[in-house]
Image (tube, helix red, strand yellow):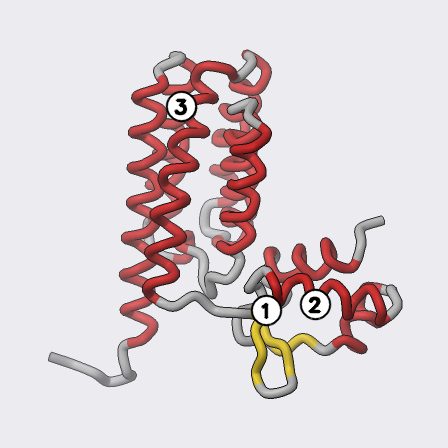
Amino acid sequence: MKDAYSLILSAIDNGLYRPGDRLVESELAERFGVSRTPVREALQRLETQAMLKRDGRSLIVATLDHNQLAELYAVRTELEALAARLAAQHATPEEIRVLAGMVRDDHASKGDPQALARANRRFHHQIHLASHNRYLVQQLDIVHRSMALMARTTFAAEGRDDVALDEHQAIVDAISDRDGARADAALRHHISMAYETRLKEDVRASQPLGATG
């Protein structure tokens, strides 16, 4: 059974708790069927990791401002590109077939942004594992944990699902061809497009209703 920390982190990652939501120790203990002591310890740990922040006496799920978002994507780009490059060198034939199958299967989730977001996390994690570098995987786990603090998925943007899946296919093709430079470039392009989409969606979300001109 997962511990309280993993349960709360998974709930944030899966969107059960969104940025800005207040986390109450007693409610979490009841929801997950654990005592309040491990919940309290988990909340303290998540606060230390900047996943939660103080709002008066309460703890809420943290949000990322514009600069934090830029910093996160900069680090993510470099680490993910390295993972793709290493995967092109070290991925087993079985791992490559799994990646290819994931892209094929994910087409069935088009039109469901949340399902595609979950599939996207699985796909990227599989590339991390295929790099066969445990230290890189650990660092990418930290980066992707912070990505749970983004309020919306880019897959909700019109047309992003088809484009993103095409980008995934280009990454898999490069890894399958053992072309590290092309895998690196394809991964960088994929993240750049995701970041651009997120910036556009954030601008759209922040525009006052009725604003024109």
Disc 2, SS: helix
**Cβ atoms under marks 2 and 1 closer than 8 Å:** yes
Displayed quadrant of residue 70: bottom left
Q: Nearer the viewer, mark 3 or mark 2?
A: 2
Residue 58 position within the rendered picture, expressed as x and y whole percent measured from the top left: 64, 82
136 with respect to 198 (left or right):
right
The circle drawn on residue 109 is none
Which residue is disc 1 drawn over?
Answer: 52
Disc 3, SS: helix
Q: How many marks?
A: 3
The circle drawn on residue 43 is 2
50 with respect to 192 (left or right):
right
Residue 209 position within the rendered picture, expressed as x and y whole percent measured from the top left: 29, 83
The circle drawn on residue 85 is 3
Q: CA distance from mark 3 to mark 1?
A: 33 Å
Q: Amino acid at mark 3?
A: Arg
Q: CA distance from mark 3 to mark 2?
A: 36 Å
Residue visible at 16% across and 81% down in the picture: 212
